[in-house]
């Protein structure tokens, strides 16, 4: 009769249980750092060609190259953010003062605005409340902010809510530059032991998808921000550069761009510039929105063989599931599934 204490299957079961427990505990320990590390991986991967060139200039000194690249990437993130926050803060103060003055003078909208479905009756009711109760607008804004706070925090939370997470991400970027190549080679060797040579196809799909999403989002955001800024300038709005930069940031989040140019169009109509407001609305509808729909597919189709619709579903579903970092995680997951599907179809065709 087999001794239970020395049974091989029991030892394997205990080892598997111990390993599973360690993995669960390690996940709990590392969970607060997962999102910053994912951002670090994305930043390091996208800027890796620049790191390779700098490494060659520094004659293979990895620590020095990693330090320089980390400083450059950090400044590229922090400096524009500080400039934009300062600019928007200044313009918001001026916009609030102008809005308050306009409310004191009274708001008269064109008659066709009140005939618009859904929007017209809501504006009619809101203006009537403002006329009888000046604080009604502030109450309406507070209510809208409270209703939207949860959704906005969920979207923005993927980036990190404080300086500590940014520091963790940048610290991780440094080690990605310094040791990322050897670590990636180790990961590939481990995956080869379980998946075989097919792992190289999966890694290639991940790399192509991350680059395609980053380049596509940035190219579309820059194009939309530029086109929008031109429209704001022609319409006579103050601070068209700040509004264009705000539109560019909103373009990084799916379906958020209209929030800026529709709001600017409404403001122009409210302040009596009906022609300019209508023109800006049409410009946003026909130019700002469509430029993103043109640029993204072009970049995606040139950078990867994955269908644009699949990438779009990955972006939207990723944001819902994982927050802002899901912009990249979602398409990567679908890209790996697509690579598995194509490999399976190729094996079936070869065996037929």
Image (spheres, rainbow, N blue to C red):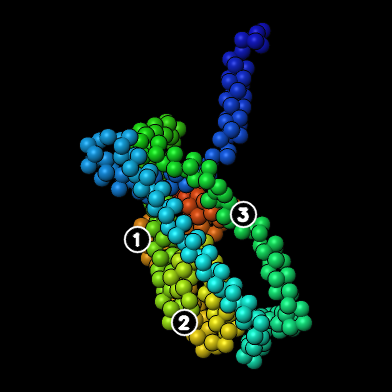
Between marks 3 and 1, how big is the CA–CA gap? 32 Å
Mark 1 or 2: in front is 2
Residue 309 higher or lower than 94, as above or below: above
Q: Is residue 350 left or right of residue 320?
A: left
Q: If you read the primary sequence from the N terminus, does the residue marked by circle 3 or circle 2 appear first? A: 3
Q: Measuring from the top left, give residue 338's x and y in whole percent.
A: 46, 52
Quadrant that contains the N terminus: top right
Q: Is residue 124 left or right of residue 299?
A: right
Mark 3 or 1: in front is 3
Q: If you read the primary sequence from the N terminus, does the residue marked by circle 3 or circle 1 appear first? A: 3
Residue 70 higher or lower than 124, as above or below: above
Residue underneath mark 1: 302
Q: Measuring from the top left, give residue 283's x and y in whole percent.
A: 47, 80
Mark 3 crowdedness (10 Å alpha carbons): few <14, some 14-19, many ≥20: some
Between marks 1 and 2, how big is the CA–CA gap? 37 Å
Q: Measuring from the top left, give residue 115's x and y in whole percent.
A: 66, 88
In the picture, the disc for residue 154 is 3
Q: Secondary structure at mark 2?
A: loop
Which residue is pictured at 64% across the width and 92% down the height?
Answer: 111
In the picture, the disc for residue 236 is 2
Q: Which residue is farthest right?
A: 132
Residue 258 shows in the view: no
Q: Is residue 105 left or right of residue 182?
A: right
């Amino acid at each position: 009769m087999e001794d239970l204490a020395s049974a091989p299957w029991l030892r394997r079961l205990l080892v598997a249980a111990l390993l599973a427990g360690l993995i669960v505990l390690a996940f709990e320990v590392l969970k607060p750092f997962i999102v910053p590390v994912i951002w670090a991986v994305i930043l390091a991967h996208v800027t890796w060609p620049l790191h390779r060139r700098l490494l060659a200039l520094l004659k293979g000194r990895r620590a020095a190259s990693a330090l320089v690249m980390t400083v450059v990437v950090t400044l590229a993130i922090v400096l524009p953010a500080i400039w934009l926050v300062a600019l928007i803060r200044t313009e918001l103060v001026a916009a609030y003062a102008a809005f308050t003055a306009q409310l004191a003078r009274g708001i008269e909208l064109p008659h066709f605005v009140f005939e618009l479905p859904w929007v017209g009756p809501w504006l009619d009711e809101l203006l009537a409340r403002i006329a009888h109760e000046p604080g009604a607008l502030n109450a309406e804004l507070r209510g809208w902010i409270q209703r939207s706070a949860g959704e906005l925090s969920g979207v923005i939370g993927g980036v990190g809510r404080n300086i500590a997470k940014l520091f963790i991400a940048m610290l991780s970027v440094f080690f990605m530059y310094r040791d990322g190549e050897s670590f990636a080679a180790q990961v590939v060797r481990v995956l080869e032991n379980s998946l075989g040579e097919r792992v190289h196809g999966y890694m290639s799909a991940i790399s192509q998808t991350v680059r395609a999403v980053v380049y596509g989002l940035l190219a579309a955001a820059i194009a939309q921000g530029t086109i929008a800024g031109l429209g704001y300038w022609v319409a006579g709005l103050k601070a068209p550069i700040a509004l264009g930069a705000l539109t560019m940031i909103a373009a990084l989040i799916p379906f958020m761009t209209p929030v800026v140019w529709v709001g600017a169009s409404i403001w122009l109509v409210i302040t009596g510039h009906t022609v300019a407001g209508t023109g800006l609305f049409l410009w946003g509808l026909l130019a700002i929105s469509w430029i993103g729909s043109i640029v993204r597919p072009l970049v995606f189709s040139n950078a990867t063989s994955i269908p644009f619709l699949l990438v779009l579903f990955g972006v939207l579903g990723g944001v819902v599931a994982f927050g802002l970092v899901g912009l990249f995680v979602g398409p990567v997951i679908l890209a790996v599934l697509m690579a598995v599907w194509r490999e399976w179809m190729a094996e079936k065709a070869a065996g037929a």
